[in-house]
Image: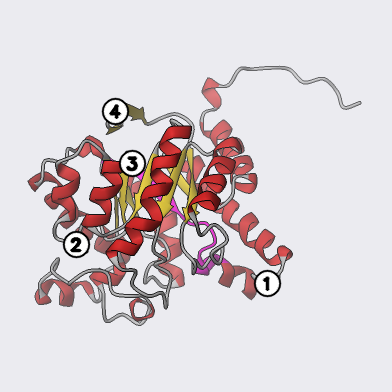
Amino acid sequence: MDKKIFKFKNKTLETGGETILCGIVNVTPDSFSDGGKFFGVDRAVKRAMELIDEGAGMIDIGGESTRPGSTYVEIEEEINRVVPVIKKLKEMTDVPLSIDTWKSEVAKKAIEAGVDIVNDITGFLGDPKMAEVVGKSDVGAIIMFNPVIARPDHVSSKKFPTFGTGFAFTDEELESFKDMEIVNLMKKYFEKSIELCKENGIEKNRIMLDPGIGFGLTKRENLKLVDKIDVIDEMGYFTFLGVSRKRFIVNLLSENKIEISSENEIGFENRDEASAALTTIGAYKGVEVLRVHTMKHHRLAKIVADAVRLNEDMKDINFDAYK
C-alpha cells in the first residue's frame, strides 16, 4: 500500500517509520489513572516535560475525565485548566500537542493557544460545531469511534457520562447499530465522522482514526478491535491507539490472580507492564501513534516491536560471545 501522510499546521508525518508514543497529561482532579496527580498548570507542564525527556513524541492534554462515572466539566473551567498548560508548553517544546476535548469552544481556545491537533473522543459527533472549528484551522484531527454514542442503551454505555446532544444518528440508525458486529459498527461510525470532515474542509491527510478502546465496549469487543486494528490502515488513515491501563487489561490480570490494586505500586506496575504488551502488538502492526501513561514500559516495548517490523532497515551486525 502507498505511504500515507498526516498533516497538521506546517508539519507532515509519513507511515512506515517508528511508532510515536503520545504521553498523557490529565489536568483533572479525578482521572481514573492518576487520581489528579498532575492537576494544576505547573504540575501538568512538569509532567509533560518529563514524558518528553523520556521519549514521548507527542503530548495529549485533557481537562475533563471521561471515565465511567465521571461528571461534566463546564466549558469555562475546562478552558482554564488546559489553555495555560498549552501556552507554557509551546514556549518550551516543539513536540506536537493535542487537546483531548469534544467541546468546540474548548477546542477553539486551545487552537488559539497554539495546540497542533484536536483529539475528539466523539469523532465530531458530540458537538455539532466541532468540525467547523477544526475545519477553519490548520490543525490535525484525531477522530475516535465512540460506542457510547452509537449504542446509548447498551449496558456498557450506561456506565459512561453523556457526550453531546445526540444529534449524530437517527433513531433508525441507532436501532440498526444494536446488534451490529463491532468492527462494522466502527466503520459505520467513521463514515459519519469523515462525512462531517469533508463538509467542513478537513482533508483526509489531516485525520487520524482511533478505535475507541475502552469506551462502552465489552471485553471481547475491546480485544477484537485491537486484533483487527489493521482495518484502519486498510481504510487509508493513520491509526491512533489508546490501550494504556484500560479496564479490560485489569480484568485479564485479575482473572489470572495477578495484583491489580491501584492503591499500591505493584498493582500499577502490573497494569503498565500488561499495557505495554499491547503496545508491542500495536507497534508491530504499524500503528502510527500509541497513547500511553508512562514511557518506561511502553518505550521498551515499542523499540523491540519497531525493530522486528522494520528489520529490513536495521543495520546488520555480528555479535560477540557473552563474557
Q: Which mark is residue 67?
A: none
Q: CA distance from mark 1 to mark 3?
A: 34 Å
Residue 149's x, y, as percent?
25, 70
Q: Earlier in the sequence, mark 4 or mark 3?
A: 4
Q: Earlier in the sequence, mark 2 or mark 4?
A: 4
* Of labels 2 and 4, the one closer to you: 2
Q: CA distance from mark 4 to mark 1?
A: 47 Å
Residue 57's x, y, as percent?
48, 36
Residue 165 appears in the figure: yes
Q: Which mark is residue 127?
A: 2
In the shown orientation, is residue 124 left or right of residue 208? left
Residue placed under numbered mark 1 in the picture: 263
In the shown orientation, is residue 186 left or right of residue 318? left
Q: Assign the C terminus to one quadrant of the image.
A: top right
Q: Secondary structure at mark 2?
A: loop
Q: Earlier in the sequence, mark 4 or mark 1?
A: 4
Q: Is residue 152 above or below residue 236?
A: below
Q: Is residue 242 magenta?
A: yes
| Amino acid bearing label 2 | Asp
Q: Is residue 143 above or below residue 310?
A: below
Please tell me how crowded label 3 is: few (under 14), some (14-19), or many (20+) other residues with Cα within 10 Å.
many
Kindly give the residue lying farthest to the left in the view shown: 199
Residue placed under numbered mark 3 in the picture: 115
Residue placed at 22% from the left, 64% from the top? 126
Q: Which mark is residue 2?
A: 4
Q: Earlier in the sequence, mark 2 or mark 1?
A: 2
Q: CA distance from mark 3 to mark 2?
A: 19 Å
Q: Marks 4 and 3: CB-CB under 8 Å? A: no
Q: CA distance from mark 4 to mark 3?
A: 29 Å
In the shown orientation, is residue 320 left or right of residue 70? right
| Amino acid bearing label 1 | Glu
